[in-house]
Amino acid sequence: MNFEFQEEHQLLRKTVRQFVDQEIIPNIAKWEEQGAFDKNVWKRLADLGLMGVCVPEKYGGSGMDYNSLAIVCEELERGDTAFRTAVSVHTGLNSMTLMQWGTEQQKQRYLTPQAKGEKIGAFGLTEPGAGSDVAAMSTVAVRDGDDYVLNGQKTWISLCDIADHFIVFAYTDKSKKHHGISAFIVERTMTGFSSKAIKGKYGIKSGNTGELFFDQMRVPKENLLGEEGEGFKIAMSSLDNGRFTVAAGAVGLSLACLEASVKYCHERETFGKEIGQHQLVQQMIAKMEAGLQMSRLLVYRVGELKNKGVRNTRETSLAKWQACDFANKAADDAVQIHGAYGYSDEYPVARYLRNSKAPVIYEGTREIHTIMQAEYVLGYREDKVLSQMLPKWPFEE
Ligand SMILES: Cc1cc2nc3c(=O)[nH]c(=O)nc-3n(C[C@H](O)[C@H](O)[C@H](O)COP(=O)(O)OP(=O)(O)OC[C@H]3O[C@@H](n4cnc5c(N)ncnc54)[C@H](O)[C@@H]3O)c2cc1C
């Protein structure tokens, strides 16, 4: 496996880092206070070609490899989690799912404008009564002529008020349990669709998260993604991609925690020396560095597997679990290193701590990934090759 990045990777990292330093970090406190997701930033990110990073050029993307997407997520979350979350749902959970499972017609209609950044995609799986236990969902889709009629509700959906297109999941045959779930591409403008943001979130305050409602919503049969009954399989494959982006973002958050802490270690003195000279503070710094480097390796290994078109559910789960846990711990230690000042908005570390929590919950909680890893090792779980895999990189044109 080769983790030597090419010149185009370095250039991509530099471009995103510059954008984050100039456009996101100076404004993030204001956006957090307003509780608003700034769509202008999205447009500018799209202008840089960052909305279709690992999407083939023939579908409007930039055709870069899967680790390029990791670099984008890493650098975005070094600035703020909200924008990385947006890329995770737009590209990781939506566009890559269309790449993997969409018909040519669906790719032309939905993937291409998304990759160009003209439209925004999101992903609705979670419901009030169904989070980790996906099959507990209540949303139903009933075939009626050339349409499906969807009724139900989704919750905790990122970009709920902002996205143009959603991939959503509903039962077409509840008696078949997991095998009775189907996936649909839904447009915001469809009659019977509405959304509502959740207020009072603990973190990711500049992000938009909330509920989707489907009330007798008619979805044309052409918008069924995959076959009827393939929804659960599709959802899990989407998570292989979403989790990769979440893990990559966590690397960026760990880096942000380390950078802020190192700076403060040199600024703050106690007992006649920089706090960085105290061994217990050094221990926190050393653990942050170890977590950061281990997370990076786990994430880039997954990127390489994706480049080769190899199924990577096990490796992605491990990378997501560990990178998010490391980032959460790094953020906690970063606040600790900053003492009382870390407990205020004067420094960014309190925001890092708040933002580090959601990724430990979404796209598989810490507990779900712990169970998955144990089951793989014990031989209780095994992945089969899917009927549709992501295209290998380099993409064929
Ligand atoms: C900011 C944010 C953004 C989100 N964005 C999206 C989105 O865009 N789209 C989307 O579909 N969803 C989204 N989610 C929802 C997220 O994916 C779910 O919250 C997550 O899957 C967990 O489900 P839950 O909250 O219902 O928790 P539950 O599943 O109810 O779990 C509650 C607790 O029980 C534990 N638990 C559950 N089952 C087991 C078990 N078998 N063994 C051990 N412990 C268990 C869990 O680990 C957790 O600690 C988002 C969530 C947040 C916070």
Image (cartoon, rainbow, N blue to C red):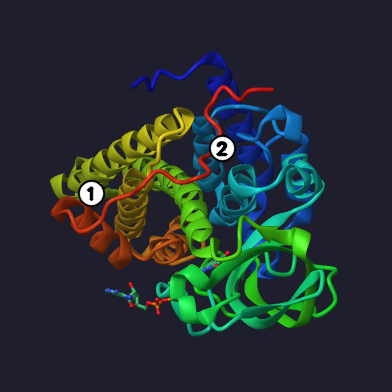
Which residue bears the numbered disc 1?
A: 284
Image vertical order of residue 182 relative to residue 295, above or below? below
**Could you say which quadrant of the image residue 28 lies in?**
bottom right
**Could you say which quadrant of the image residue 223 lies in?**
bottom right
Amino acid found under the numbered disc labelled 1: Met
Indicate the position of residue 220 as horizontal and vertical percent values: 80, 66
Question: Is any atom of residue 366 visible in this view?
Answer: yes
Amino acid found under the numbered disc labelled 2: Val
Indicate the position of residue 371 as horizontal and vertical percent values: 24, 63
Q: Secondary structure at mark 1?
A: helix
Label 2 CB-ligand 1 distance < 8 A:
no
Label 2 CA crowd tier, 10 Å (few <14, some 14–19, many 20+): many
Q: Is residue 264 left or right of residue 126?
A: left
Q: Is residue 71 left or right of residue 397?
A: left
Q: Nearer the viewer, residue 348 or 194?
A: 194
Indicate the position of residue 317 as horizontal and vertical percent values: 35, 51
Which residue bears the numbered disc 2?
A: 72
Ligand 1, by image quadrant, is bottom left
Question: Is any atom of residue 131 visible in this view?
Answer: no
Could you tell which of marks 1 and 2 lies nearer the N-terminus? 2
Image vertical order of residue 371 relative to residue 316, above or below? below
